[in-house]
Image (tube, rainbow, N blue to C red):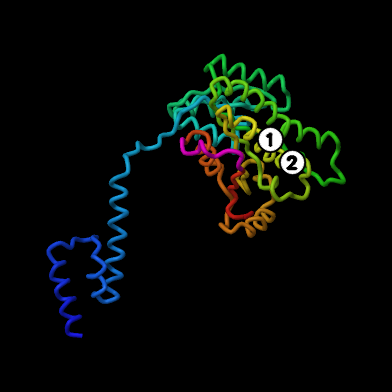
Amino acid sequence: MQAAQLTCQALALQARPTITRGAALPKAQAACLPRSKRAQLSVRAAEAVNAAAVEAAPARPGLKLEPAVCVVTGASRGIGRAIALELGSHGCKVAVNYAGNKEKAEEVAQHIQEMGGEAIPIQADMGKQEDIDRMFKEVVDKWGTVEVLVNNAGITRDTLVMKMSPQQWQEVITTNLSGVFFATQAATKIMGKKKKGRIINVGSIVGLMGNAGQANYVAAKGGVIAMTKTVAREYAARGIVANSVAPGFIETDMTAKIDQKYKDEMIKGIPLGRMGRPEEVAGLVRYLALDPSALYITGQCISINGGMLM
């Protein structure tokens, strides 16, 4: 026993001049220490290794957002308006698409210019292929290219399946699904030339979970989410990424029409206990559209719904 104690004392004396914070003791010396002390030394040794790895890693410049030429459909109000303003605030050139409200679209374009971006309002019915093709021609004539497409425009014609007319069904499918297809087709022809582009399609939580009284809208949004995956597969080799976002219950002029008692019931099913804001959806879209770190994300549907669907 005495020999063992003397050995430990000798080892400790040898270690005193050379031990520094974070340094590891030789095994023979460490074995002589109490268990709690050995644990502390292990933690310090791990910290030292991590610190050394960080110091040795090459410096990497900070990721910066990349201003781009963007087309945002349905950008005169609601989520589309918030997206156009968010992109414009980061120096983008934004085509503010609208169907009928020219005054609101011009207001959005004016705000973007005041924030340092560039913007032009363009009227185009997203249910008409000829309007879509004209819109993209105007953008290319103005800015030479299209680098980001945000398919946001949408309409509703809500009613139960048993009461839905062929016209109600087709109007929603034409604008909300076919319009996204033809806009994507037009954009990818332009993006493919430079092998660079990002497409963000605004889906909906109901496209993932269904909703009574919205068979047409649900079919369209579910189709958009599925189509996005195919676009991502087809165009990956050409440097184009495509993703969709699925907003939940968001404060817009569309949801403003819902009776408050129904809103209160819906909010009870949201773990975060509130409706989302258009600016929150816009922030997610901005990340997918501009951030360099989003270039490895494609074919995904990202939900933003306060936990309403998990």
Mark 1: give few (<14), some (14-19) or many (20+) Cα within 10 Å: many
Q: CA distance from mark 1 to mark 2?
A: 9 Å
List the residue tagged with mark 2. 217
Q: Quadrant of residue 100?
A: top right
Left or right of residue 185: residue 216: right
Give the dominant element type of the magenta stretch: helix, strand or loop. loop
Left or right of residue 61: residue 309: right
> Is residue 100 visible in the rendered structure shown here?
no
Left or right of residue 71: residue 20: left
Residue type marked 2: Tyr
For the point 31% across and 64% down, the residue is 43
From the image, which quarter does the C terminus lie in? bottom right
**For this rendering, which residue is in front, 264 or 307?**
307
Of pointers 1 and 2, the one earlier in the residue sequence: 1
Is 297 included in the stretch rendered in magenta?
A: yes
Name above or below for residue 303 compared with residue 181.
below
| Residue numbers of the magenta segment | 292-300
Q: Position of residue 274 (x, y in %)?
A: 57, 54
The circle on residue 154 is: 1
Discs 1, 2 touching: Cβ within 8 Å: yes
Q: Quadrant of residue 277?
A: top right
Name above or below for residue 205 compared with residue 264.
above
**For this rendering, which residue is in front, 106 or 147?**
147
Which residue ends up furthest to the front in the rendered image? 3
Q: Position of residue 255 (x, y in %)?
A: 66, 45
The circle on residue 184 is: none
Is 270 included in the stretch rendered in magenta?
A: no
